[in-house]
Image: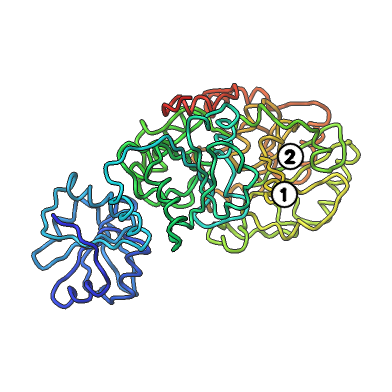
Amino acid sequence: MRFQAGTEDVVKELGKSCRFICFGYGAKLKTLCENTGITRLIDAVADNNDALWNTSGNIDNQKISLIGPEEIKKYLTEKHVLLITTTYYKQVQDQLCRELAIDLDIVYYFPSERDVKYEKYAELHAGEPLKDIIVFRSGLAKYVEGFDFSDNAKAMFEYMLDRGYHKKYQMIWMVKYPEAYLRYDNIENVEFVSYEWESEENKELSDKYFHAMYFAKYFFFTDTHFWLRHCRTGQLRINLWHGCGLKDRKTKNGPCRKSYDFMTVNSDTYAEIHAGEFGCDREQMLVTGLAKQDWLFRGVDLPLAELLGIPRADKYIFWLPTFRMAAEGLERLNEYILDSETGLPIVTTDQKMTELDGVLKSLNMTMLIKLHPVQDNSLIAHKSYSNIAVVDNKTLTEMDLHINSLLAQAAAIISDYSSVAIDFLLLDRPIGFALDDLKKYEESRGFVFNPIKEYLPGKEIYDFDQFIDFIKEVSQGNDSSRIRRNNLLSIFHAFNNGNNCERILESVGIKI
C-alpha cells in the first residue's frame, strides 16, 4: 500500500469517477468537503472514537454513516478511494497496515503545511539518535494568558531545576511568547521556544522548534497533545494532566492510548477512571500523585497578608468555585448560564457578599476567592470588601505563584466540583462543598463518582446560611467532617508525602 499526500484538486478529479470512504470525522474532513463538494460521494466515515460508531454525522446538511475502523472492508469496492481525513494520519497509516490489513494500491492523506515542514526536517535527520532533551508544555491548544507556564508541568520543571537535572538534560519549554521568560536566560540548558515557530518562515527559529520535537527523549504536558502528533520510536510522552477531580469529561474525543504513553494519576481508583475516560490502557496510568500537589507541602516563604497585600487575619479561608460561565473566547467550555449578580454560586447577590464580608470581619478571618482560570470574572473583579479578596490567575502568573503554594496557609477551603478539593485533602483540613446547583451541574456535566454525595470528603453546603455556618465552624476550630475525610482519603490518594515529582521521574526512568 502506498500513502500519497493528496490535494483538494486531486480529490475533485477523483470525484468525477470514484466514490469515497474516509477515515477521520472532524474539522479536516469538513473543510475538505466544503472546498471540494464531495459530501454526496462519501459512503461512510470511519473513526477511532467508539462513541461515533453506528451513528450518523452531518456535513453540508447531508447525513453520513459513521463506522468503526473494522467495518471499512465492508464498504470498500473497486469504485472507492480511501481518504485519511484526520490530522493523526501517521497513526492511521500504521493502523491500516498493521491492525486492519487493508489492501489498496494507494491511500491519500492530507498533511498541513506544518506537517510537511516536520516531515522534511525528519527526512533530513533520519536515523540520528534521540538526545538528552526534555520538552515541557502546559495549557490548552488555544492560548490563554497564564496557562503557558503553569500547573503540573511547571511543578515538574521547578522540581527538576532545583535538583540539577538541567545539568544533564536540556530543558525546553514550549510557550507562545518566549520573551516573557528572559529571567531563565542565564540558567544552563534551559530554553524557551515558541510553539508558533512550527509555522515560522524564519528557518533558524523553525529549526529550533523542530529540533526539540524531533530529538527530545521526553515530553511533559498538561492538556493539549495535538502538537505531539508526530512521534519517533523511543520518545516518551507523559500527560501530567491538570487534576484528578469529581467531574466527568465534558467531551470525549476518542481513544488517547496512541496519543501519549503515560498519564499521571492520584490512586488506583483514578487509574481505572482515567483509563476509561481517556480511552487508554490501564498500564498507561502512573499512580504517582500529581506534580503540583507537592506545592501544598512546600508552601511559600512569606505570610499571605504580606505576599498578597490583604488584611491580616487569624485564619484564611479560600473559596475556589469551578467555572460555570467561561471567559470570552472560551464559551464552548460553558457548563450553563449562572443567574447571579456576582458570577458566583450561593453568594449570588451583592447584598449577600456584603453580609459575608461582615461575618468574616467579626471573626477576624479573610476569605480569598480564587476563580477558575477560564471563569468570566467581570461581575466580581472590580468590587471591594474589607475581608474578601479576589485573586485571579493573571495575578498569580505575574507573581510566579500557584494556588497550591498558597493553600499551604489555608485553614480551610470551600470548593464544589473542582479537583483542587481533592488536592487539598492531602493537608487534612476542613473542606466545604458548595452544592446549591448540584442537580443542574450533574445534568450539564456529570460526575465520575456516583452517587456523588457518598464521595464528598467534606461538609455539604446548599444555601447561604450553611455557607456562613461552615465559616463559623472553621473560626471555632470545629472539624465535623474529619472522619469522613479520613475514610475517603485512600480512594483519592495512594500517597501523602509530597514526593510526587520524584515518583514520576522514577516511573519514566529519568535520572540525573
Q: Nearer the viewer, mark 2 or mark 1?
A: 1
Which one is in front, 235 or 491?
Answer: 235
Q: Amino acid at mark 1?
A: Thr
Residue at image location 52% in from the left, 29% down from the top: 165
Q: Which mark is residue 103?
A: none
- Rendered view: 337 above or below 424: below
SS at mark 2 in the image: strand
Q: Amino acid at mark 2?
A: Phe
Q: Which residue is mark 2?
A: 318
- Considering every residue shown, the one lying at the far right of the view is 362
Q: Which residue is mark 1?
A: 395
Q: Earlier in the sequence, mark 2 or mark 1?
A: 2
Coloring scheme used:
rainbow
Which one is in front, 420 or 395?
Answer: 395
Q: Which percent across, then down, holds residue 265? A: 48, 33
Q: Marks 2 and 1, how far apart in space?
A: 16 Å
Q: Which percent across, then down, holds residue 381? A: 76, 56
Which one is in front, 317 or 134?
Answer: 134
Badge 1: residue crowd in 10 Å (few <14, some 14–19, many ≥20): few
